[in-house]
Image (cartoon, rainbow, N blue to C red):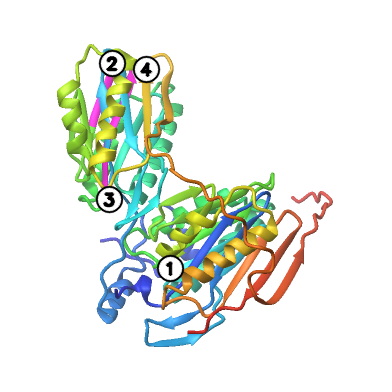
Amino acid sequence: MAAVEEPQDYLDVLQSHRGGFSFENCKRNAYLASQVAIKPPTAMKSGTTICGIQLKDVVILAADTRSTCGPMVADKNCEKLHFIAKNVYCAGAGTAADLQHTTEMMESQMELLRMATGTQPRVCTVVRRLSSMLFKYQGYVGCALVLGGVDVTGPHLFQIYPHGSTDKLPFTSMGSGSLAAMAILEAEYNENLSVEEGKKLVAKAIRAGIFNDLGSGSNVDVCVITKDVGGTILRNFEKPNERKFRAKHAAFPIGTTPIMKQEITKLVSVEEDVVMRD
Amino acid sequence: MSGLMEYNGSAIVAMAGENCVGIASDTRHGIRQLQTVSCNRQKTFQVTDQCYVGLSGLATDVQTVSQLLNFRMKLFTLREERKMQPRMIGNMIASMLYEKRFGPYFTEPVVAGLDGEHKPYLCTFDFIGCLSTAEDFVVSGTTAEQLFGVCESFWRPGMNKDELFETLSQCLLSAADRDCLAGWGGVVHIITPDEIITKKLKGRMD
């Protein structure tokens, strides 16, 4: 094992953290856990319904927009369709932080690859990189993905599990509402569907998840990826759960809340002279 | 409930108004339900002229993260000779927290600020750095559930700075009344394009 250099000051600590995970709090957290007899706090999850279908020369992905934290709805209209490259998008289920950061990392890797090779990234490249990364972390990075894209070899739809296994499928669904969505897809999927029919089908599958799975809810997002245009996200493609009422009561009168002390800091804008430095 | 997130207790809420944004927090620092150590704990921190970060959760990590943020902000201004925009601060906090994915800080930050065009920016994180932005309001802390409830019915679009203050403080006070771990007074900061108004609230002390 490589020798671990003891950091001398905070700059060293910062330097040693350039990239990769930091485990410096692990020992402390284990100690705290033993002292306080705790259960670990719940991270934000997307108890989700996501699905994707592959048609003649187009891939369509769809997702619901609810993110949960235990039984609480943490975000009523979050985005679960992630950009990876112009021609590759993915829908994610699992731990929200992992999904956000893993897809962002993949996005930057693919952009660097595109600039280095001068070609459009291929779907299988993204899948391989993601599955190697997820396998390396043994499932602790909780990303369940439905990944789709169109490249030189045609349209592709993949499914990636948190432990790193992958499947290439014509249609698939994931997340806690996957059973509901799959029921619709199994019954109605046909590879000869038109793009419009495809959009309707994925939206119907997600709706099945929204209404039958408690972890999924709110609206339907759809993403269509074609060879010519690349991917387009149709945000809130369907809104089956609009709020049924609006607050009509009067605002609180000014001075309702008793205060003890008030401080007002005036902000001024300062035009600084340009100083040349060498 | 016994966990590190519930050890010290906190209530933080931020709301958007018309060209202004507000952030409020309670001031209790306690040890579970057994003891209240102090009632003027700082939980909201000014990071730039027009941006505040509220930190809920374990008090030791609240302080550590606030100091880390302070350090990062200063280093950024020295290197780049400019101020960070709230959106950037949000992304920075997200990556700072996610770096510690497997040995996290037990704190859930909230960012509230005005961007260059005086548009409100609000976002919140879970303790491992999942950023979620909102147009209306964000909440955090042990009182999150109660705050969600009151804010959902009292928030309205297009509030001016005075309306925003009343709504924000009424939401905080009524939510904290239903959480025995938070309360004991409150602080509200209203950020407008040309001033920061800080008010200390008179709250229940039980």
Residue A153: mark: 2
The answer to whether marks 4 and 1 sit on the same chain is no
Q: At numbered mark 1, what does the secondary structure look like: helix, strand or loop?
A: loop
Q: Tags 3 and 2 in contact by the CB under 8 Å rule? A: no
Between A211 and A171, which is closer to the camera in this rendering?
Answer: A211
The kind of residue on which mark 2 rests is Thr
- Image coordinates of residue B66 in percent, x first then y, are 53, 68
Element under label 3? loop
Q: CA distance from mark 4 to mark 2?
A: 13 Å
Query: Can you tell which of label 4 and label 1 is closer to the viewer?
Result: 1
Mark nearer the N terminus (4 vs 2): 2
Q: CA distance from mark 4 to mark 1?
A: 46 Å
Q: Amino acid at mark 1?
A: Thr
Residue A192, magenta (yes or no) = no
State the extent of the magenta-drawn residues as a range. Answer: A142-158
Q: Whole-percent x and y of residue B2? A: 30, 75
At 80% from the left and 54% from the top, the residue drawn is A269
Whether labels 3 and 2 belong to a single chain: the reply is yes
Closer mark to the observer between disc 2 and disc 1: 1
Q: Position of residue B179 (x, y in %)?
A: 42, 74
Task: Give the residue type that dot 4 points to.
Answer: Thr
For discs 1 and 3, the disc positioned in front in the rendered view: 1
Sequence-earlier tag: 3 or 4: 3
Dot 1, how many residues are within 10 Å of its Cα: few (below 14), some (14-19), or many (20+)?
A: many
* Disc ID at residue A141: 3
Residue drawn 45% across and 53% down? B95
Q: Name the disc covering residue A226, or none.
A: 4
Report how far apart the C-alphas of labels 3 and 2 lie in the structure.
30 Å
Q: Which residue is mark 1?
A: B143
Q: Quadrant of the N terminus of chain B?
A: bottom left
Mark 3 and mark 4: Cα distance apart in space: 30 Å
* Mark 3 vs 2, N-terminal side: 3
